[in-house]
Amino acid sequence: MIIIFSVLIFFLLLVVGLDVGFSMIVAALTGMLLHTGGGVDPIMVPMTLVSSVDSAALVAVPLFVLAGEIMNQGGLTRRLIEWSTAMVGHFRGSLSQVAMTTNLMMAGITGSAVADATATGAMLIPAMKKEGYKPGYAAAVIAAGAMLGPILPPSIPMIVYAVVANVSVAKLFMAGIVPGLMLFAGYVAICAFIARKRNYLAKPRATWRTQVQSTRVAIWALVVPVMIVLGIRSGIITETEAAGVICIYALFVGIFVYRDLKIRKLGAVFYSAAKTSAVILFLLAAAGPFSWLMSEAHIATMISQFILGISKDPLIVLLVVNLLLLAVGMVFEPLPALVMFVPTLLPIQAALGIDPIHFATVVIINLMIGMLHPPVGLLILITAAIGRVRLWSVAMETLPFLGWSLVVLLLVSVFPFLVTWLPNLAIR
């Protein structure tokens, strides 16, 4: 009864506009004070706040955020866009193809959908609108492309999941590669189909010399995903060390190679990265007291028993979990949903013997899809704001990309080898 009351308080606070993190803390504190058999000592709130983020693996989160911010300000993102234009700009619907290709490369650097949407959207949405693309479609393309960020390595949500579920970050990174490429292939096919249907023209094909020149200029940015994957795969560096190395590398390239990043701007870069990191880590910390209260109320056990009561077949259970998380994604942003619901779902994975990397990948893809559909639809909100487009028009134009994302989610759920073979092959 107390947990129901706490959940109601949580939703009420969200409705009145209180931040998600503060809402979780207040709801958890209320539940503790009204706990059956006498109130729980409020000291549990700060204790669980601290313990939730007391993990060395989480150091990678602010470092990858900082790396993405440095790359955006240091000119690496702009060079990636120019390279993508030279390589795929001659395809029909050229700017939409450029947007997808750029986001694919950005995904291997920042690990953040919000960072990718902001960086590429600010440059490409106005350009697409200028060339006659429907404003809602231009924003939808950026939103769909940015969703690749948290699925391909390095992924901030994967790092968070690994900490919550105590699984290998490196294996999770490898597991996201095939689904990420599947999403990308479908997205570019959708862009080509819509471009043909709406007669969006292509740019003239870049000459071989231009392509070589663009690659030469952008090579400093293009090698970053390769450095991350090979460094972690070879065991030379850990995920956290990789994040630190990329920060130093991006600083060097931005200041001394491209010379777009001025020393006097570093304060603003670090400040922006710190704000973003603080939001992420605060959400993780705030989920601690709430998760503790749910654990005390045995919510995980009740949900596990309910789902397992439906079926003991792992495939059917995975499909039920997908439906549950798709509903969750309509209300919660991905990171709060991750830290709140993953501990509840882990007993189900353990009880049925589902491969933990397979289960993790399904959960992460599912929650990332939540960024592409209302009412929360974080990427829709961001790209609509950047492009100054009506939210509803962006949501409607996102439907084909959302449909393919659901197809990939279904395929990954039904065929585990799509996500397990590469981690098993690459990491022993």
Image (cartoon, grey):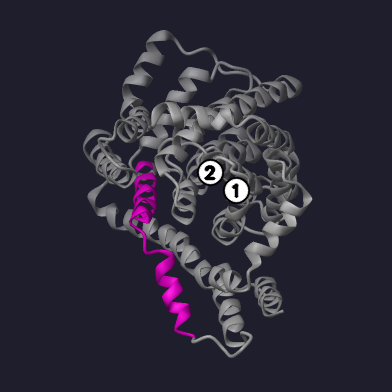
Q: Quadrant of residue 169?
A: top left
Q: Secondary structure at mark 1?
A: helix
Which sits in the foreground, 90 or 42? Answer: 42
Coordinates of residue 21 in the picture (x, y in percent):
54, 69
Pointer 2 local density, CA inside 10 Å: few below 14, some 14–19, many at least 20: some
Residue 47 lies in the magenta-colored region: yes
> Considering only vertical position in the picture, is 388 above or below 336?
above
**Where residue 244 appears, x then y in whole percent?**
28, 46
Question: What is the number of the mark on residue 349?
Answer: 1
Q: State whether residue 283 is above or below residue 218.
A: below
Q: Which residue: 45% across, 32% down?
A: 423
Q: Is residue 76 left or right of residue 244?
A: right
Q: Which residues are drawn in magenta? A: 42-71
Residue furthest to the top in view is 208
Which label was assigned to residue 333?
none
91 vs 368: above or below: above
Q: Is label 1 in contact with label 2 (beta carbons under 8 Å)?
A: yes
Query: For the residues marked 1 and 2, what is the alpha-carbon distance in whole angstroms?
Result: 7 Å
Please state which amino acid type lies under the numbered disc 1: Gln
> Which residue is labeled 2 in the image?
356
- What type is the residue that disc 2 sits on? Pro
